[in-house]
Image: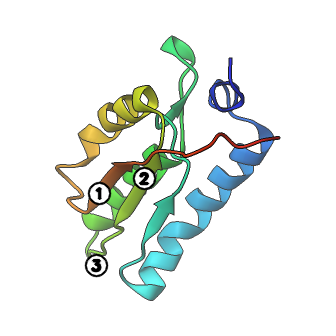
């Protein structure tokens, strides 16, 4: 198992803290600033874990917020750019975010290739 496969197996404390910040502040930023862009450079599959033990990742949390604020009385757009290098995770990311696309037309999900693997 590679380091990035292991990373997306379950949410770690750092991811939980990031998701807390996203849930608490992205909507407020968007309401105060207007259109706000969210870029997730390591989007993964959109979810952590598999089967019954799946937890929403950043792309899903932001898609939910985007749907919520797009349908609010003061409609605000939250365009999202989700980037994932792994083909299998990219396909899962596309499937996981598909239900939100009809409500938030500004989602852009992309894939890129790494020229070399990160070294840790």
- Element type where label 2 sits in the image: strand
Mark 2 nearby-residue class (10 Å; few <14, some 14–19, many ≥20): many
Residue sitting at x 30%, y 31%? 95
Mark-to-mark CA distance, 2 and 3 = 25 Å
Left or right of 92 on screen, residue 21: right
Q: Is residue 39 above or below residue 7?
A: below
The N terminus sits in image quarter: top right
Give the residue pinned by disc 3: 74
N-terminal of the pair, mark 2 or mark 3, is 3
Q: Can you identify the residue that label 2 sits on?
A: 82
Residue at the extreme right: 120
**Label 3 packing within 10 angstroms: few (<14), some (14-19), many (20+):** few
For the C terminus, which image quadrant?
top right
In this view of the protein, which residue sits in the foreground, 27 or 111? 111
- Which residue is nearer to you in this view: 22 or 93? 93
87 left or right of 5 in image = left
Q: CA distance from mark 1 to mark 3?
A: 19 Å
Residue at 38% x, 52% y: name it.
63
Which type of secondary structure does the marked residue at label 3 adopt?
Answer: loop
Q: Earlier in the sequence, mark 1 or mark 3?
A: 3
Quarter-wise, where is residue 60 in the image? top left
- Give the mark nearer the N terminus: 1 vs 2: 2
Q: Which of the 4 image quadrants contains residue 20?
A: bottom right
Instruction: Tell me the CA gap for discs 1 and 2.
Output: 8 Å
- Residue 54 sits above or below residue 41 on the image: above
Of tags 2 and 3, which is closer to the observer? Answer: 2
Across and down, in percent, residue 40 comes to: 51, 56
Q: Which mark is residue 107?
A: 1
User: Are the two marked residues, 1 and 2, in contact with CB atoms closer than 8 angstroms?
Assistant: yes
Q: Nearer the viewer, mark 1 or mark 3?
A: 1
């Amino acid at each position: 198992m590679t380091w990035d496969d292991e990373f997306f197996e379950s949410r770690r404390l750092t991811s939980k803290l990031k998701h807390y910040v996203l849930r608490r502040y992205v909507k407020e930023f968007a309401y105060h600033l207007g259109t706000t862009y969210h870029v997730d450079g390591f989007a993964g599959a959109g979810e952590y874990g598999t089967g019954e033990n799946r937890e929403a990742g950043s792309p899903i949390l932001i898609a939910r917020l985007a749907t919520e604020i797009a349908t609010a009385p003061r409609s605000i757009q939250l365009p999202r750019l989700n980037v994932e290098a792994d083909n299998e995770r990219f396909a899962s990311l596309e499937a996981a975010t598909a239900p939100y696309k009809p409500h938030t037309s500004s989602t852009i999900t992309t894939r890129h290739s790494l020229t070399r693997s990160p070294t840790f």
